[in-house]
Image (spheres, rainbow, N blue to C red):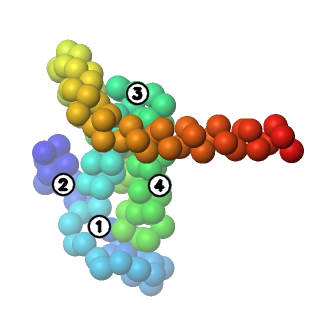
Amino acid sequence: MVSQVITHFYERARPFDAHPHDTLLVLSPSHEPSFPSDHAIAAFAIACSVAFVSRRVGAFFLAGATMIGIGRILVGLHYPGDIAGGALIGLIAAGLVFWFSDGRITGLVGLASRVTDPVVRPGWRALDRAKAARRRTRRSA
């Protein structure tokens, strides 16, 4: 919603439109305004939401969101400021949701864990056995 409001007041041309001779577009073009990046907003809102619940897992999500943003710049769809603006909006949105939820998100994550843990537990056990076997092999070598 914030992105839509911003684009009504500030319309910035995308790099491939503003610099058609300097940009090699490798994806089909979008003709919506460049600032802010909707992809960056979504990626960073998700990543920051996860980071508020778990810093370790959130670090992976933030790395992924950063790669999405860099990729959007490299393919000529956004300027760095578009991604930074989207990241800031995503962070603020995630922060507001987390703050207003008053800790209920942590309860939802706990509920989701109780549902998914039995499904993924065999896989985690197999990985633990493989790690233990690797350690035994290293010690004996």
Question: Furthest residue to the right?
Answer: 141
Q: Are marks 4 and 2 in contact (CB under 8 Å)?
A: no
Whichever of callouts 2 and 3 sits on the residue coming sooner in the sequence is: 2
Tag 1 residue:
13
**Spatial separation of the CA atoms under disc 2 and disc 1:** 11 Å
Residue at 65% x, 37% y: name it.
132
**Spatial separation of the CA atoms under disc 3 and disc 4:** 20 Å
Whichever of callouts 1 and 4 sits on the residue coming sooner in the sequence is: 1
- Secondary structure at badge 2 equals helix
- Image coordinates of residue 90 in percent, x first then y, are 29, 40
Three-letter amino acid code of the residue under disc 4? Met
- Secondary structure at badge 3 equals loop
Report crowding for label 3: few under 14, some 14 to 19, many 20 or more residues within 10 A (C-alpha). Answer: few
**Spatial separation of the CA atoms under disc 1 and disc 3:** 37 Å
Report crowding for label 2: few under 14, some 14 to 19, many 20 or more residues within 10 A (C-alpha). Answer: some
Looking at the image, which is closer to me, 102 or 5?
A: 102
- Image coordinates of residue 78 in percent, x first then y, are 38, 63
Three-letter amino acid code of the residue under disc 2? Thr
Looking at the image, which is closer to me, 97 or 35?
A: 97
Whichever of callouts 2 and 1 sits on the residue coming sooner in the sequence is: 2
Residue at 17% x, 43% y: name it.
2
Compared with 68, 84 (above or below) is above
Whichever of callouts 4 and 2 sits on the residue coming sooner in the sequence is: 2
**Spatial separation of the CA atoms under disc 1 and disc 4:** 22 Å
Three-letter amino acid code of the residue under disc 1? Ala
